Image (spheres, helix red, strand yellow):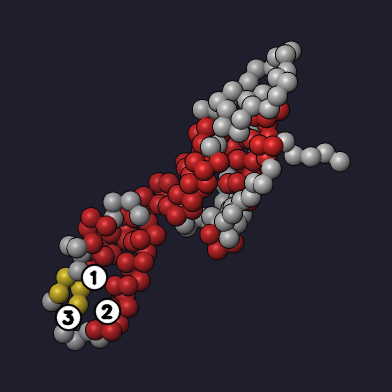
Amino acid sequence: MQTLPGYLSNTRCPLTNTDKFDGTNWPTWSNNILSIALLKEITGYLDGTTTKPAITTLMPTTETPWNSPNPSGDEWDAKNTWTKILITFNTKNPVGLGITINGTAAKAWKTYKDSYKTTSDMARQNIKQKLRNLTFSDKDDFQNHVTIMRNKLSQARACKGTLYACLDHTVGFT
């Protein structure tokens, strides 16, 4: 029976099913993935800065640390695979969302960013505009207006970014 090397022991992909990427929650999901990557010190596998070493005839006799910028080829393969599993297993349907799952973790991560970061930026602008357009008039139900405002605020918080700067100037009263 084969055992996992020390750098792969006790590694989990901690997102719940509701936190998994579904094509609409890029800001929250990507922040969660980046936080986990920072914690596990694998951001180099996401952004491609930790590259697979050239094949050498000399193999290291001891494991390199998990966060080593110069892992052995086998260690790089294992860590890259773990990183790719982190992002793909925490996605509800990676193939259906058009994510490249073949190749490196960096290639998969680039697919996510190219496909969904821009969409999320547009969604952020859309929510910002909706907040600016919300108005309350005397004939409106105040409780309903408060509920709508809370829902829009919740959506705004999910988008994060620079949206909060506009919140204090968004509500119009007529």
Residue holding disc 1: 134
Relative to 64, is 23 above or below?
A: below
For the point 27% across and 79% down, the residue is: 145
Q: Cα distance, mark 2 to mark 3?
A: 10 Å
Q: Amino acid at mark 3?
A: Ser
Q: Residue 146 in the image: x percent, y percent?
A: 28, 78
Q: Cα distance, mark 1 to mark 2?
A: 9 Å
* Residue 60 falls left or right of residue 107: right
For the point 55% across and 37% down, the residue is: 42
Q: Residue 53 in the image: x percent, y percent?
A: 63, 20
Q: Are marks 1 and 2 in contact (CB under 8 Å)?
A: yes
Residue holding disc 2: 145
CA neighbours of label 1 inside 10 A, class few (<14), some (14 to 19), many (20+): some
Label count reads 3
- Tell which residue pokes out farthest to the right in this image: 1
Q: Amino acid at mark 2?
A: His
Residue holding disc 3: 137
- Tell which residue pokes out farthest to the top in this image: 57
Work out which quarter of the rendered image holds the N terminus and state it: top right
Q: Amino acid at mark 1?
A: Leu
